[in-house]
Image (tube, grey):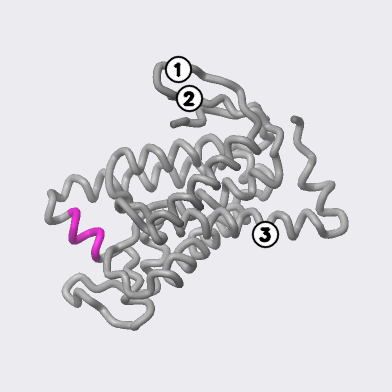
Amino acid sequence: MFFPLKDENPTQRKPILSVAIIIINTLVYIFSATRGVEGFQAFVVQYGLIPYEITHMTELTPRLASPIFLTLLTSMFLHGGIMHLAGNMLFLWVFGNNIEDHLGHFRFLLFYILAGFAADGLFILFSPNSQIPLVGASGAIAGVLGAYLVLYPRARIHTLIFLLYFIRVVKIPAAVVLGFWFFYQILMSAMSSGAGGGVAWLAHVGGFAFGWLLFRIFASKPGGGQRIYRVQW
């Protein structure tokens, strides 16, 4: 088990939107958690993404209806628990600032949302009849991780590692940290047929693949490499 704590990749702009996304996610979770068990469940059903509703264009719970396609967006700001929220926001805090610095605020927001849509799309493709609400920022953040792997593979990540009695913070290249993370998502997705234990592994894979492919395409364009590899390693 490992947790990234920070990187050694300096930025020139303040990560205004990354911080704003973290604040919004936190406030939404606090609001939903204070509604009680039934209120929380109703909130998740109303604003979470239910693949069956998308593929069949129907509302499973009319009394809790919200625009079906709007849930593609609203589901990115819901979380199933405090640890779910904390884990996602930690990864966004560590890796989001550099992608926002590279893209600029508006383009970062657009990229973040599109990565979330890509994550949702892959999950829906393989689980079109699922009636369990899909929630969390994991897919969008996975897109950020994929972009980071392309842009800053050699950046050193201060990583807290738990391995039996070995507990230590070590500096590991981003390519190793993110490569292992993605391999784990693929492995768990294969073992659980895309979703298991309440985790939508395929959504993580979809978001990461979207971010990685998009930035690889831009990196291969004339002049793209100069912009992408401008950071200090």
Instruction: Kindly report the distance in space between the C-alpha atoms of the residues bearing marks 1 and 3.
Output: 37 Å
Answer yes or no: do the residues labelled 1 and 2 have beta carbons within 8 Å?
A: yes
Dividing the image into 4 quarters, which one contains the C terminus?
A: top right
Which residue is tagged 1? 166
Instruction: Kindly report the distance in space between the C-alpha atoms of the residues bearing marks 1 and 2.
Output: 7 Å
**Mark number displayed over residue 203:** none
Which residue is tagged 2? 161
- Residue 31: horizontal and vertical position, in percent? 24, 48
Residue at left offset 81%, top offset 53%: 224
For the residue labelled by badge 2, is the local secondary structure a helix, a strand or a loop?
Answer: strand
Amino acid found under the numbered disc labelled 2: Ile
Earlier in the chain: of badge 1 and badge 2, it is 2
Amino acid found under the numbered disc labelled 3: Leu
The residue nearer to you, when weighing 175 against 81, is: 175
Q: Decide if residue 68 is on the left or right side of residue 12.
A: left
Which residue is tagged 3? 214
What range of the chain is rendered magenta? 40-45
Earlier in the chain: of badge 1 and badge 3, it is 1
Earlier in the chain: of badge 3 and badge 2, it is 2
